[in-house]
């Protein structure tokens, strides 16, 4: 994109450059932005984007486009907007793209009243996770406002009042699912919060310490469109509605009347002037319509009365101005928005999300896109395609379609009744042929994947004709075709619509319907993954409609890691102008030749490709095959032991017989008393120099024992720890003890000490409370004597016994009955539970050599390559170099006559990485633990761990050595002290 002053996206370009500069080093916690934001925001940024947390969450992270959108918003609103009493779109331009204000009409445009508040638009392609960005920004606002209020600060940049606006019913329902969870079947409208995005992806959205607060806020403060202003909420609100609720389009504007005496008024106009609300349903003035108008006025009044509000507009291209007869006009919803914002100043924030934030202006060759002026981030369809975040796009250029006449609309008779044209029938048959091929090929590798075809019709008179054609002439059953248009809910009613909606949104999980026919209702918010074929039977040439139509099928269907290489190769082939090798995550557009010019730009940039009749003879899944369990696989299976419960060693103590304990004879009580000072003198002088207790040696303040009871408490703690840790030397204070010997029954020990002091310590009755006698107990000889006496007594009274038994469960690799792999990067094997084993398409040479070596070595009885994606239970826990916990999967399991080996193969330079060394310690500790079990419990031979560098493998292979000999030679030997990293994931 040229970075010129005339660029319509100059604000996005300038803000992104500023943001990226401030965020250099963010992953390691060294970015400038961390010093410019609140502590709450800094904590969230490190949680979302810090390298340690990103690695710990594995695949659950924001992608590049989402990350840029979140960072740009925080910089624009929190950093650049800090310290400004007013913060408008014009101010943002001055901070990020001042030169853009000097060109064209941009200055006049952004200075308008409707932009006189914080206003941000996120240009993000369909299928790239706009809702996650929305929820992250809401959590950022909520936690910051909560923290500020807790400190007595009213920070105008943050709020707890939110409204999320959807363009229509489909998106509205999707947003309720995202925040509140899916509807519970027969639950009378209640929702399962555990199925909401906020709950399911809590590990991504917020640190543990904030989850309860966020969950409580969301569950208690979400209002649907019928509850806004009526539901009691707690110090905040998340109102979810569609723009129709706030649309005032049916309210007539005040127009100055001009009297024209030469043209008398029509009688009906006179009646309308006198009786503006004519009775009767036919005139739109039924009671329910009037009720809705009244309620809408109350909602507007309520929202306008709020002191602050952040509005999120999903699919925001609906809410901006449009041109009619050359005159620019704001849509009605935008007028309502302006009224709501009028009294709030910078405390009203507008955040727009759209894949298509522009208006089509002009016609024919002069037609162009005019983008919204407040776009602050740009992650377009091209960027998403390059990153592999959406399906690849191909045009189906069949000969029969290429020969179609340029007439592509439905035919109509003299009465205007429509009928499908021959061209439309050809396109439908071509799409259905593609769908049937995908269904057959996909079922071979995964019968649970059900590709779908979407037909987009020109209007609601054509869509029933399509459904009839598919059923009557193409042999589809009634349940295999689903007809959805914008009047469907009104036609069915709320009760009958619910199961239709449920069926529509769960099409991915079911074989039927196979074809979905729609007009406009599914242009936005229809977020399913399995749309693989789109047949656009529409007459509009608007670019925005085209992009929205394509957007319905862009979401990925094959997200598993084993298909990543194949999809990457597809993108490379499309980029090179070649047909893809497979149709996994490829969206096929059966387009009329008249509209193919829309795709030229994508094709020229290598982002869209074409397929022809030749693909009919090629598998839609490329060379992906399923490796099944072989017959007699049990002989080659591996059972990995998991310790569910270990036997416990319990220590009990008999009650002590105090009469048998030795008395203190080194000095008499009188002699000890002579060593003491009195009262404060004793405490301030003697105790400051004395070292009586090992863990309270340092200063007199710590040793200012306030009385006899406190003395007993400290002595109890000292004795319970003396048996497990040495007394600290020097002047260090033991602030805590990790492994106290006596963790329970300390009250009994205190009682024994008290009785011993009164009756046995000095061989006669001793009253510690008489005349401050207890002070003699603080002297070093007395403390040493009591500590030694009770330590010996406790040890002698100790009894050890084992309770329970070790419970072990074996998880077998055969629990996964099949592995998906590419035929070109796999080989048939005979000593494995699966018929084939695969290696990575990129940098997989070492694994390939190992598989062939193991297959050829007669001393190897069985082996298997562990699939990280399928054998998820075969993972070791370890602690990384930075102190954070992590998992890893060994590459292979190998069994010989003498051992079972966990084998990790690494490129030579990787073997010395600190985390690899930590993995070694974790693996060795696990093997030691498992080998401590009985033979029956661990499933046979002992377990060993082997790390093999590439050079060692090549060297031993070149000498003709056996793999089994190398494994025995290279196995890790036990360490003197096993690490504590000893548990396998279960």
Image (cartoon, grey):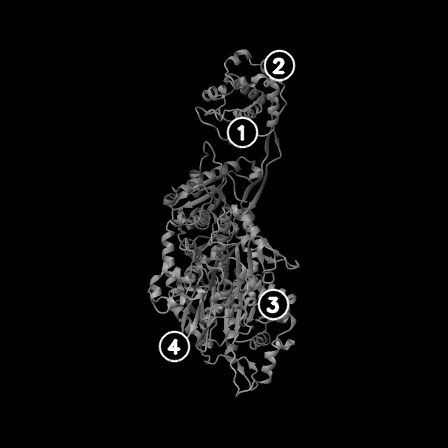
768 left or right, relative to 584: right
Report which residue position mark 2 lands on: 765
User: Badge 4 local density, few (<14 within 10 Å), some, or many (20+)?
Assistant: few
Counting residues from the start of the chain, the first of labels 4 and 2 encountered is: 4
Q: Where is residue 916? Give x, y as percent.
A: 42, 42
Alpha-carbon distance for marks 4 and 3?
47 Å
Report which residue position mark 1 lands on: 740
Query: Which dot, 2 or 3, sits closer to the camera?
Result: 3
Query: Which dot, 4 or 3, sits closer to the camera?
Result: 3
Query: Which dot, 1 or 2, sits closer to the camera?
Result: 2
Alpha-carbon distance for marks 1 and 3?
70 Å
Mark carried by residue 621: none
Residue 800 in sight in this render: no
Mark carried by residue 294: 3
Image quarter where the C terminus lies is top right
Q: Are marks 2 and 3 in contact (CB under 8 Å)?
A: no
Residue 875 in sight in this render: yes
Counting residues from the start of the chain, the first of labels 2 and 3 encountered is: 3
Q: Is residue 849 above or below residue 655?
A: below
**Residue at disc 1, secondary structure:** loop
**Residue at disc 2, secondary structure:** loop
Query: Which dot, 1 or 3, sits closer to the camera?
Result: 3
Report which residue position mark 4 lands on: 365
User: Badge 3 local density, few (<14 within 10 Å), some, or many (20+)?
Assistant: few
Residue in view at x 56 percent, y 69 percent:
516
Q: Are marks 4 and 3 in contact (CB under 8 Å)?
A: no
Alpha-carbon distance for marks 1 and 4?
83 Å
Alpha-carbon distance for marks 1 and 2?
32 Å
Query: Residue pushed farthest bottom?
Result: 262
User: Badge 1 local density, few (<14 within 10 Å), some, or many (20+)?
Assistant: some
């Amino acid at each position: 994109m040229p970075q010129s002053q005339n660029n319509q996206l100059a604000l996005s370009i300038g803000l992104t450059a500023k943001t990226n500069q401030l965020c250099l080093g963010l992953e390691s916690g060294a970015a400038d932005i961390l010093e410019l934001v609140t502590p709450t925001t800094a904590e969230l940024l490190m949680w979302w984007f810090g390298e340690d947390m990103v690695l710990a969450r594995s695949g659950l992270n924001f992608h590049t486009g989402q990350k840029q959108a979140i960072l740009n918003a925080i910089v624009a609103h929190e950093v650049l907007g800090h310290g400004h009493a007013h913060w408008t779109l014009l101010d943002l331009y001055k901070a990020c793209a001042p030169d853009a204000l000097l060109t064209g009409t941009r200055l006049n445009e952004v200075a308008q009243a409707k932009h006189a508040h914080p206003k941000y638009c996120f240009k993000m392609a369909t299928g790239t996770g706009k809702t996650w960005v929305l929820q992250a920004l809401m959590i950022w606002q909520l936690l910051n406002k909560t923290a500020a209020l807790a400190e007595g600060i009213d920070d105008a940049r943050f709020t707890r009042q939110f409204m999320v606006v959807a363009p229509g019913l489909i998106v509205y329902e999707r947003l309720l699912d995202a925040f509140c969870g899916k509807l519970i079947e027969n639950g009378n409208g209640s929702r399962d919060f555990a199925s909401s995005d906020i709950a399911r992806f809590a590990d991504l959205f917020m640190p543990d310490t904030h989850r309860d607060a966020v969950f409580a806020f969301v569950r208690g403060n979400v209002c649907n469109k019928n509850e806004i202003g009526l539901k009691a909420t707690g110090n905040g609100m998340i109102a979810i509605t569609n723009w129709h609720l706030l649309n005032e389009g049916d309210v007539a504007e005040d127009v100055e009347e001009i009297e024209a005496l030469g043209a008398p008024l029509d009688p009906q106009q006179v009646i309308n002037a006198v009786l503006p609300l004519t009775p009767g349903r036919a005139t739109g003035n039924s009671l329910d319509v009037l009720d809705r108008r009244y309620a809408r006025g109350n909602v507007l009044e309520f929202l306008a009365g709020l002191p602050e509000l952040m509005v999120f507009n999903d699919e925001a291209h609906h809410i901006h101005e449009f041109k009619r007869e050359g005159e620019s006009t704001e849509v009605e919803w935008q007028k309502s928005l302006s009224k709501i914002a009028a009294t709030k100043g910078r405390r009203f924030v507008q955040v727009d999300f759209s894949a298509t934030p522009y208006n089509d202006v002009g016609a024919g060759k002069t037609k162009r896109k005019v983008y919204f002026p407040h776009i602050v981030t740009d992650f377009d369809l091209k960027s998403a395609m390059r990153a592999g975040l959406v399906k690849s796009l191909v045009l189906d250029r069949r000969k029969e379609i290429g020969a179609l006449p340029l007439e592509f609309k439905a035919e109509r008779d003299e009465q205007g009744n429509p009928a499908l044209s021959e061209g439309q029938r050809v396109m439908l048959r071509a799409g259905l042929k593609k769908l049937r091929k995908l269904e057959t090929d996909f079922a071979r590798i995964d019968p649970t994947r059900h590709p779908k075809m979407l037909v987009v019709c020109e209007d609601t008179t054509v869509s029933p004709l399509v459904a009839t054609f598919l059923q009557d002439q193409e042999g589809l059953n009634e349940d295999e075709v689903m007809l959805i248009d914008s009047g469907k809910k009104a036609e069915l009613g709320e009760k009958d619509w619910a199961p239709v909606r449920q069926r529509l949104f769960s099409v991915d999980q079911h074989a039927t319907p196979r074809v979905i026919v729609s007009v406009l209702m599914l242009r936005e918010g229809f977020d399913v993954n399995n749309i693989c074929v789109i047949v656009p039977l529409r007459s509009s040439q608007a670019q925005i409609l085209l992009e929205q139509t394509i957007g319905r099928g862009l979401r990925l269907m094959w997200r598993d890691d084993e298909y990543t290489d194949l999809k990457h190769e597809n993108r490379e082939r499309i980029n090179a102008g070649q047909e893809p090798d497979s149709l996994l995550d490829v969206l096929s557009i059966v387009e009329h030749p008249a509209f193919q010019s829309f795709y030229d730009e994508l094709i020229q940039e290598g982002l869209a490709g074409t397929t022809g009749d030749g693909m009919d003879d090629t598998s839609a899944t490329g060379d992906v095959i399923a490796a099944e369990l072989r017959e007699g696989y049990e002989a080659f299976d591996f059972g990995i032991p998991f310790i569910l419960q270990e036997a416990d060693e319990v220590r009990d103590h008999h009650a002590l017989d105090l009469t048998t304990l030795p008395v203190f004879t080194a000095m008499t009580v009188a002699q000890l008393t002579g060593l003491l000072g009195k009262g404060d003198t004793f405490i301030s002088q003697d105790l400051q120099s004395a070292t009586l207790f090992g863990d309270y040696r340092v200063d007199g303040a710590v040793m200012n024992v306030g009385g006899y009871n406190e003395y007993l408490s400290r002595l109890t703690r000292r004795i319970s720890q003396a048996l497990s840790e040495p007394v600290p030397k020097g002047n260090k204070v033991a602030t805590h003890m990790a492994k106290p010997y006596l963790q329970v029954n300390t009250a009994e020990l205190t009682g024994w000490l008290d009785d011993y002091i009164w009756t046995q310590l000095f061989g006669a009755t001793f009253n510690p409370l008489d005349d401050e006698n207890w002070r003699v107990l603080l002297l070093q000889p007395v403390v040493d004597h009591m500590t030694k006496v009770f330590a010996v007594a406790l040890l002698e009274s100790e009894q050890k016994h084992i309770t329970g038994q070790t419970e072990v469960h074996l998880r077998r690799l055969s629990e996964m009955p099949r592995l998906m792999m590419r035929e070109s990067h796999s080989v048939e094997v005979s000593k494995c539970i699966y018929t084939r084993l695969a290696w990575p398409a990129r940098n997989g040479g070492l694994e390939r050599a190992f598989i062939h070596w193991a297959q050829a070595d007669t001393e190897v009885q069985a082996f298997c390559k562990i699939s990280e994606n399928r054998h998820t239970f075969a993972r070791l826990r370890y602690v990384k170099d930075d102190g954070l916990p992590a998992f890893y999967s060994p590459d292979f399991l190998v069994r010989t006559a003498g051992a079972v080996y966990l084998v990790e193969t690494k490129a030579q330079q990787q073997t010395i990485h600190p985390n690899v060394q930590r993995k070694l310690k974790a693996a060795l500790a696990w093997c030691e633990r498992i080998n401590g079990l009985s033979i029956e419990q661990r499933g046979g031979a002992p377990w060993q761990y082997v790390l093999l560098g590439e050079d060692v493998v090549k060297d031993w292979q070149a000498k003709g050595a056996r793999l089994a000999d190398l494994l025995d030679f290279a196995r890790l030997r036990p360490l003197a002290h096993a690490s504590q990293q000893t548990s396998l994931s279960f």
